[in-house]
Image (spheres, grey):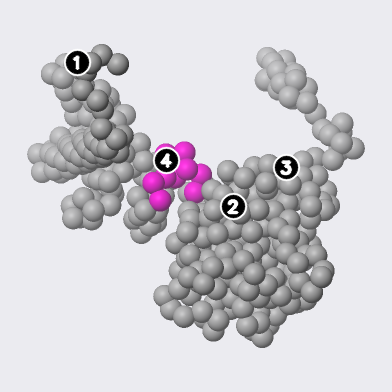
C-alpha cells in the first residue's frame, strides 16, 4: 500500500453497506413516487375526458384526436396511444373515489391496474386483489395468476378447528392462510398417483408450490424424520410460517379424506411441538391435503382434535393416458381437416 494512502478503518465495510442501502431505498422510493404520479396523471386524464364527453358533448372520436395531438406535443413520452387513452377512461370509470385510488391503485404499476380492469368486473374484487398485490409485492405475472386461479374464492375456505384450538387473532390469521381447493395445475400426473409421486412433484416445483401456498411459508423439509419411543416417523412436508411464527405440518393423501388421517396428524403436531418447536414459537398447525373430501366428515373428524389443523382438497392437471393419445387427432390432422372444410368446394 502507498504510504500516502490513508489506511481504511475497520468500520468502513459496514459504513459502505449502510450508504448503499440508503441509496437503494431512496431509489425504490423515487420509483414508487414516479409510478404513483403516473397513475394519478392517467386517472386525471381519463376523468377529464369523461367530463368533456358528458358536459361538452365530445364523442368517442375525441380519443383518436387526442392520441395524435398529445403524441405530437410530447414526442418523447409514450402512453398516449388510443388504446392507452381508452384504458385511462375505463380507469377513471372504475375508480371514482380519489382517496381510495391514492391508497390502493396508485401504489401499483399501470400494468397492474390494467390487469385489474381487464380481468375483474367488480370493484370489491379489484380492491381485494390490489391490496393483496401491495401487501405481498406481487409482480404482474403473479397478480394475473392469482386472479385466474380464483384466489379470492379459495382463500380461507379450508375446513379447520382453529376457532376452538387457537386464540384470536391468531386463529383468524391461520384460517386465512389456508385455501380450498389448492391448485396444483403445474403438476401433470397420469391416472392414480402414489403419495410419494405427488410429494416429489411438489418438491420438484417448489417455487410454484410455495406461490400456491401463499406468502410467509418457508420450506423446512420433506420426509422430515422424527423419532418417538425408538420408532421412526416421517412427516410428508414441514414448513415454517414467518408471520404466524409456527411450524406447519402438511400430510398428502391421494384419495378421499378419512377421519383416521386427523388422528395421525394430531400425533405429528404433538411431537413437533415437543421436539422441534422453539419455546417462543406458536403451537404447530397442520393441514391434510386430499384429492377429495366430504365437508361434513372433515368437520366431525376435526371436532375432537386438540391440535389446530385443517383439511383441504387439491386439483391437478392430468395428462392423457398413452392408450388414449393415439385415438385423438394431431394438430396437423386438425389443420388438414379445417382446410378441407373451408375450401370453396364445401362452401
C-alpha distance separating marks 3 and 2:
22 Å
Are there few (<14), some (14-19), or many (20+) residues within 10 Å of tag 3?
Answer: some
- The residue shown at (70%, 80%) is 301
Residue 112: x percent and y percent?
Answer: 36, 41
Residue 326 x, y percent position in the rendering: 87, 31
Query: What residue is shown at x 13% (from left), y 43% (from top)?
Result: 51
| Residue 231 in picture, x, y percent from top left | 82, 69
**In this figure, which residue is indicated by the disc labeled 4?**
139
| Outermost residue toward the right in this view | 323
Mark 3 or 2, closer to the camera? 2
Q: Which residues are magenta?
A: 136-146
Task: Choose the circle earlier in sequence order: 3 or 1.
Answer: 1
Residue 219: mark: 2
Find the distance from the CA under tag 2 to the CA under tag 4: 21 Å
- The residue under label 1 is 4
The residue pinned by badge 3 equals 188
Rendered-image quadrant of the N terminus: top left
Amino acid at each position: 500500500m502507498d504510504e500516502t494512502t490513508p489506511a481504511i478503518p475497520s468500520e468502513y465495510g459496514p459504513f459502505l453497506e449502510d450508504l448503499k442501502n440508503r441509496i437503494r431505498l431512496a431509489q425504490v422510493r423515487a420509483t414508487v413516487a414516479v409510478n404513483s404520479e403516473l397513475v394519478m396523471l392517467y386517472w386525471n386524464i381519463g376523468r377529464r375526458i369523461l367530463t368533456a364527453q358528458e358536459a361538452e358533448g365530445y364523442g368517442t372520436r375525441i380519443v383518436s384526436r387526442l392520441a395524435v395531438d398529445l403524441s405530437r406535443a410530447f414526442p418523447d413520452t409514450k402512453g398516449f396511444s388510443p388504446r392507452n387513452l381508452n384504458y385511462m377512461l375505463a380507469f377513471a370509470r372504475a375508480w371514482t373515489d380519489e382517496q381510495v385510488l391514492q391508497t390502493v391503485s396508485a401504489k401499483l404499476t399501470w400494468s397492474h391496474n390494467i390487469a385489474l380492469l381487464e380481468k375483474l368486473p367488480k370493484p370489491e374484487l379489484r380492491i381485494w386483489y390490489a391490496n393483496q398485490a401491495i401487501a405481498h409485492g406481487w409482480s404482474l405475472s403473479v397478480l394475473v395468476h392469482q386472479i385466474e386461479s380464483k384466489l379470492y374464492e379459495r382463500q380461507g375456505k379450508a375446513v379447520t378447528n382453529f376457532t376452538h384450538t387457537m386464540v384470536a387473532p391468531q386463529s383468524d390469521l391461520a384460517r386465512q392462510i389456508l385455501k380450498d381447493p389448492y391448485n396444483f395445475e403445474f403438476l401433470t400426473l397420469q391416472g392414480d398417483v402414489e403419495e410419494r409421486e405427488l410429494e416429489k412433484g411438489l418438491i420438484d416445483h417448489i417455487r410454484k408450490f410455495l406461490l400456491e401456498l401463499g406468502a410467509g411459508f418457508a420450506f423446512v423439509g420433506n420426509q422430515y424424520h422424527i423419532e418417538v419411543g425408538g420408532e421412526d416417523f416421517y412427516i410428508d412436508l414441514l414448513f415454517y410460517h414467518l408471520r404466524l411464527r409456527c411450524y406447519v405440518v402438511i400430510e398428502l393423501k391421494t384419495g378421499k379424506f378419512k377421519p383416521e388421517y386427523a388422528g395421525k396428524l394430531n400425533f405429528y403436531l404433538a411431537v413437533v411441538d415437543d421436539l422441534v418447536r422453539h419455546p417462543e414459537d406458536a403451537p404447530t398447525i397442520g393441514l391434510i391435503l386430499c384429492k377429495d373430501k366430504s365437508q361434513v366428515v372433515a368437520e366431525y373428524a376435526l371436532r375432537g382434535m386438540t391440535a389446530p389443523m385443517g383439511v383441504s382438497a387439491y386439483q391437478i392437471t392430468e395428462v392423457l393416458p398413452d392408450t388414449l393419445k393415439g385415438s385423438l387427432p394431431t394438430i396437423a390432422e386438425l389443420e388438414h381437416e379445417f382446410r378441407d372444410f373451408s375450401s370453396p368446394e364445401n362452401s
